[in-house]
Structure formats: C-alpha cells, structure tokens
Amino acid sequence: MGFFPPGYKSAVESDKSSSEPNPKYFEFTNKYLKDGDTAQFRICGDFDSGHVVCGFQYFTMEGRIKRFPNYPENYLSDIGLTYQAKKEGGDEKDKPKYFLAFTAFSPDRDDFVCVTVTQKNLRIQIEEILAMEDYTDGPGPANFTITVKRKGTGKDTQWIVTPTLKKASAAFTKKWDEAKDSIWLPALYVSADPFAGKPAEAKLDGLPPMKRDELGADTEVATAGISKDW
C-alpha cells in the first residue's frame, strides 16, 4: 500500500491538466480556439428546458468565476482586476460582463458541451441565424449546425458564424433524449456542475435571452437547440 490514494495526480501533472481546456465546456478564447481554427456545434434545448441561460459573470480576486441571472450588486469588493491592471500592476477593478450559455453537441469531442459566449458580435450572428425563416429550433435539437471560424488575435479578432441546414437524424435525436435530463445550465448561477443533472426542485432563474428589434424593443430570442446529424 502506498501513501497516495488511487488516481492521485502529482504536482506537475496537476499544473499540466489545469492548463488544458475542460472537454465539457467551450468558450471563444485562445484556450479553446486559436487564429484560423474552426469549431462546429449543434445547439440542443432551450431556456424552458434548462439548456440555455444568460446573465452576467465576473472573476473574483481569487480567480473564481461567478455568474448571476441579473446584474449583481455590491460586487466591487469581490471582483478581480482588469486585464490591463493585472498586466501593469494597477488596481483598476473589472466590470461584470454579459454572457449567453447554451447546450450544444460538439462533433470534435463527440459529446454535449456547455458553450459560453461573451462577445457581442458572436451573439448578434447567432441571433440573426435563429431569426432566419428556415432555421427552426425547439426544446429538442434544431434543424441546423453552425461553424464558427476565428480570424486574427486580440482586438483584431473576427468571428464568422456560418449556419448549415441539416436536420437531426433519428439516432441523434435519441442520443439527445437520453442525455438532456443530465444537463441543467442554471447550475452555473450557483457555481455547481451543469452536467450533474436537473435538481429535484429545479426552477428557472432570470429571463430568456433577449435582443432588440428594429424599433428598439426587447424581444425574446429563440435560443433553442440546433439539431444534429453528424
């Protein structure tokens, strides 16, 4: 019998694994997508089913992420510094950023993942796709996939979202039906695991993601799933 329990990771292994992307999550950052790279998804589920959430997020001074369905109050003592302040040794506090998170199937990982979007330009493109006549969504998989391509780095980064009409197969729909109850994105609001399943007394927080129409009024965004047929 040894000192360390089964599955123990050495300090070197822990440092290495902490820098690797979590395969259950995807964000549009250097860690997940570099210049010239592309990623494909099929969004699944919607707000009512607990597979799409939005709100505000920030990193604490300790580097922990916190998410809220509404703009948080009294966050100044908790929120971390801006990127520039950390880089230059300053003391300027960051601000909460708006986010959209949805469940999607990633063919690269052959699994369902939680995709988080903070970039306004990306959200606009997704909203426009969901508003297109032939692109339908619902509580199940939608009838299209999206390919996101990154061009450039830093402030020069461009995101190009290309939709492809592609109805989900019966086999994929069954795959989603078997997996959907194990995913509950409102868990993000309490820093819990969204892949631990829907709580017995689960309730939805906040409001469905919104966008502005031509007259400037808030309208609900149809952020339901994008069926998949990979």
Image (cartoon, helix red, strand yellow):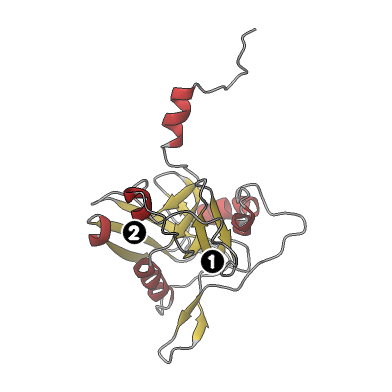
Q: Position of residue 4 (x, y in %)?
A: 60, 15
Q: CA distance from mark 1 to mark 2?
A: 21 Å
Q: Amino acid at mark 1?
A: Cys
Q: Nearer the viewer, residue 154 or 53?
A: 154
Q: Nearer the viewer, residue 149 or 8?
A: 8
Q: Nearer the viewer, mark 1 or mark 2?
A: 1
**Any mark on residue 106, and which?**
none
Q: In which quadrant is the N terminus drawn?
A: top right
What is the crowding at mark 2: few (fewer than 14 residues within 10 Å), some, or many (at least 20)? some
Compared across the picture, whether 202 is left or right of 8 comes to right
Q: Nearer the viewer, residue 197 or 44?
A: 197
Secondary structure of the residue carrying tag 2 is strand
Residue beneath the point at 54% across and 61% down = 76
**Residue at (47% x, 73% y) in the render:** 136
Query: What residue is at 43 percent from the left and 61 percent from the top?
Result: 117
Q: Which residue is mark 1?
A: 54
Residue annotated with mark 2: 147
Is 26 rendered above or below residue 5? below
Mark 1: give few (<14), some (14-19) or many (20+) Cα within 10 Å. many
Q: Position of residue 154 (x, y in %)?
A: 26, 56
Measured along the vertical axis of the image, is residue 208 above or below residue 52? Answer: below
